[in-house]
Amino acid sequence: MTEIVDHYRITARSLWNSAFWAVSDLRTPEAREQFDEINLMLFDGLVLARLEQQLERAQLFRSPMPFLRVTPSSQTVPILINNPRPEGTGYWDHPLNSVDSDKVEMHFIEFFDWNQFDYVDFQYYRVKIAKLDGHPDVVGREALIERQYAHVKFVEE
């Protein structure tokens, strides 16, 4: 399953880096919106269609996909968990900075890079924590986990 998601990742990354970012005139919010539309179609065609799954485009990359589970590739892996602030903003600085593979369930949302107007690598999986034994306070929060520390599994529901 990781191969299917990585195929999409490499395709989307290449499209942004070689067709949009490489041309300075296309480093605009309008061009980013165009890329985002193309990116939705890529994910739909390269991942969802192959898995025989359907989601409304408005949900893609905004809502977690419970059928795509991001699982740690070793017993304990580093993670950045969103830590909301009272003013409504959040940072990826929750004090819990690692998770154990047998205690966590994470659902894929999208790939993530810090700067959307720069060269991208899609280094992180952006996920929603569905379960974390011993830490109910972070269930429902978003988190970032580096690709090198995780795999994606398809779970039929």
Image (cartoon, rainbow, N blue to C red):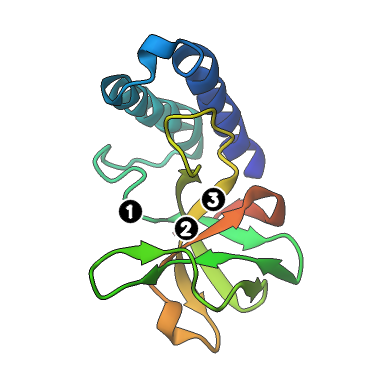
- Label 3 sits on what residue type? Tyr
- In the rendered image, which quarter is residue 116 located in? top left
- Label 2 sits on what residue type? Val
In the displayed structure, 134 sits above or below 31; it is below
**Chain-order first, disc 1 or disc 2:** 1
Q: Is 120 on the left-hand or right-hand side of 85?
A: right
In the displayed structure, 134 sits above or below 144; it is below
Q: Nearer the viewer, residue 11 or 123?
A: 123
- Label 1 sits on what residue type? Ser
Q: Residue at x 48, y 76 (%)?
A: 131
The residue at which mark 1 appears reads as: 63
Residue 98 position, x and y percent, is 64, 73
Q: CA distance from mark 3 to mark 1?
A: 13 Å
Residue 94 position, x and y percent, is 49, 74
Q: Residue at x 37, y 10 (%)?
A: 25
Badge 3 crowding class, 10 Å Cα cut-off, few under 14, some 14 to 19, many 20 or more, is many
Q: CA distance from mark 2 to mark 3?
A: 6 Å
Residue lying farthest to the right in this orientation: 74
Quadrant in the picture for the C terminus: bottom left
The residue at which mark 3 appears reads as: 125
Q: CA distance from mark 1 to mark 2?
A: 9 Å
Considering the numbered disc 2 on the image, is that residue within a helix, a strand or a loop? strand
Instruction: Say if mark 2 contacts mark 3, CB within 8 Å.
Output: yes
Q: Is 42 on the left-hand or right-hand side of 79?
A: left
Instruction: Say if mark 3 contacts mark 1, CB within 8 Å.
Output: no
Residue 80 position, x and y percent, is 54, 64
The residue at which mark 2 appears reads as: 127
Badge 2 crowding class, 10 Å Cα cut-off, few under 14, some 14 to 19, many 20 or more, is many
Considering the numbered disc 1 on the image, is that residue within a helix, a strand or a loop? loop
Considering the numbered disc 3 on the image, is that residue within a helix, a strand or a loop? strand
